[in-house]
Image (cartoon, rainbow, N blue to C red):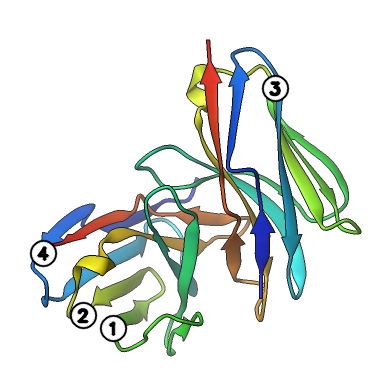
Amino acid sequence: GQSLEQPSEVTAVEGAIVQINCTYQTSGFYGLSWYQQHDGGAPTFLSYNALDGLEETGRFSSFLSRSDSYGYLLLQELQMKDSASYFCAVRGGAGANNLFFGTGTRLTVIP
Amino acid sequence: GAVVSQHPSWVICKSGTSVKIECRSLDFQATTMFWYRQFPKQSLMLMATSNEGSKATYEQGVEKDKFLINHASLTLSTLTVTSAHPEDSSFYICSARGEETQYFGPGTRLLVL
């Protein structure tokens, strides 16, 4: 099966940088994705890593190390609106179509 | 970008009744759609994978007779919660796989009294 672990909560100051880690175990691996979810809303796609290394998309970057089964999401120049839950997700299992989510990290940005 | 809609956005029903939730991909065709359930302050749990023209594939622990899934067309999948009970109260989110990524619907909040 799939197992993805994340810190449950992170608090950071506006303007700072925060890193959210994700370790995973999966049978079959087709990439690591990151999603943002505000309270009461649907997840929105942030980033995807299929290969090792860093992917940068604006203020958000994501890193993957397949040998370590580890990745992280890096948020720079934090804004108050970044307060949300962040989920890592792997596409694996019996079919590459299946997306399984991590435990989620609640990010709180404070002034 | 691609859009996925869900209807209704929220529903309150009595225990024992059935509730149908629709998921539509508005500007692309989705041969595969996914249904997730999310309890408060918890992660999204994949319930089942809905395949157009064939039976859905359910994750372990999800009762297929209770959560009926129909993928009638390339743009529509429905989830019916049969004989709903208070413990079925949750946030149900559908998702469809597009060309580049997976798109999520806005979710349906179900409250069973």
| Label 4 vs 1, first from the N-terminus | 4
Type of amino acid under label 1 = Lys
- Provide the residue designation for mark 3: A76
Circle 1/circle 2 CB separation < 8 Å: yes
Q: Chain of mark 1?
A: B
Which mark, residue A15? none
Quarter of the image holding residue A90? Answer: bottom right
Task: Reply above or below: A59 against A61.
Answer: above
| Label 4 vs 2, first from the N-terminus | 4
Type of amino acid under label 4 = Cys
Q: Chain of mark 4?
A: B
Q: Chain of mark 3?
A: A
Which mark, residue B66? 1
- Provide the residue designation for mark 2: B82
Type of amino acid under label 3 = Gln
What SS does tag 1 mark? loop
| Label 1 vs 2, first from the N-terminus | 1
Q: CA distance from mark 1 to mark 2?
A: 5 Å
- Provide the residue designation for mark 4: B13
Task: Tell me, yes or no, if residue A24 can be seen here.
Answer: yes
The reply to whether label 4 and label 3 mark residues of one chain is: no
Task: Tell me, yes or no, if residue A58 can be seen here.
Answer: no
- Residue drawn at x 45%, y 81% is B61
Residue closest to the eye, A31 or B53: A31
Task: Reply above or below: A73 against A23.
Answer: above
